[in-house]
Image (cartoon, grey):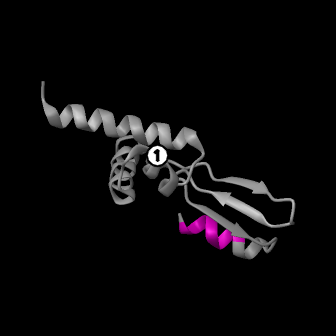
Amino acid sequence: MNLSISKRERMLSLVDQWRRSGQTRKDFCLSHGLKVCTLGYWIIRSDEQNSDPGFKEVLLAPQPSGRIEIVYPNGVKINAGGDLNMISRLIHLY
């Protein structure tokens, strides 16, 4: 059995677990004995494997404080006020 395939499958499985966990990268890595940069590397590899050249869904979740949280597909979260111009610029950064 090819070790690189085994490691790849294991790391991509951990990326999937992290995405479902709701934890920060740091907390997930602490609980799984990983370096944050290692998880980051495999998140990029996973994104490349699953990349779709089309549009990506960007979720906007209103916050109770009147602030808006933008969660990008790669897990990056941005908190912003209700300024629609700023929100539009943040969305186009992706």
Q: Residue at 33% x, 40% y: name it.
A: 11
Residue found 64% across the figure and 73% down from its top: 89
Residue closer to the observer: 41 or 48: 41
Q: Secondary structure at mark 1?
A: helix
Image position of 52 with respect to 35: above or below: above
Looking at this rendering, what residue extends furthest in the top direction? 1
Q: Quadrant of residue 32?
A: top left
Asked whether 79 or 82 is in front, the reply is 79
Residue 62 among magenta residues: no
User: Residue 3 in the image: x percent, y percent?
Assistant: 15, 33
Q: Which residues are magenta?
A: 87-93
Q: Nearer the viewer, residue 11 or 47?
A: 11
* Residue under pointer 1: 31
Q: Quadrant of the N terminus?
A: top left
Q: Residue furthest left?
A: 1
Residue at 12 percent of width and 29 percent of height = 2
Residue at 74% in and 75% down: 85
Q: Few, some or many C-alpha atoms within 10 Å of disc 1 (few <14, some 14-19, many ≥20)?
A: few
Left or right of 51 in this view: 9: left
Residue 47 placement (x, y as % from top left): 40, 47
- Magenta residue check for 91: yes
Is residue 41 toward the left or the right of residue 25 in the image? left
* Residue 53 in the image, given as x and y percentages of width and height: 44, 48
User: In the displayed structure, does residue 15 sit left or right of residue 72?
Assistant: left
Magenta span: predominant SS is helix
Tally of marks? 1
Whether residue 32 sits left or right of residue 4 in the image: it is right
Q: Amino acid at mark 1?
A: Ser
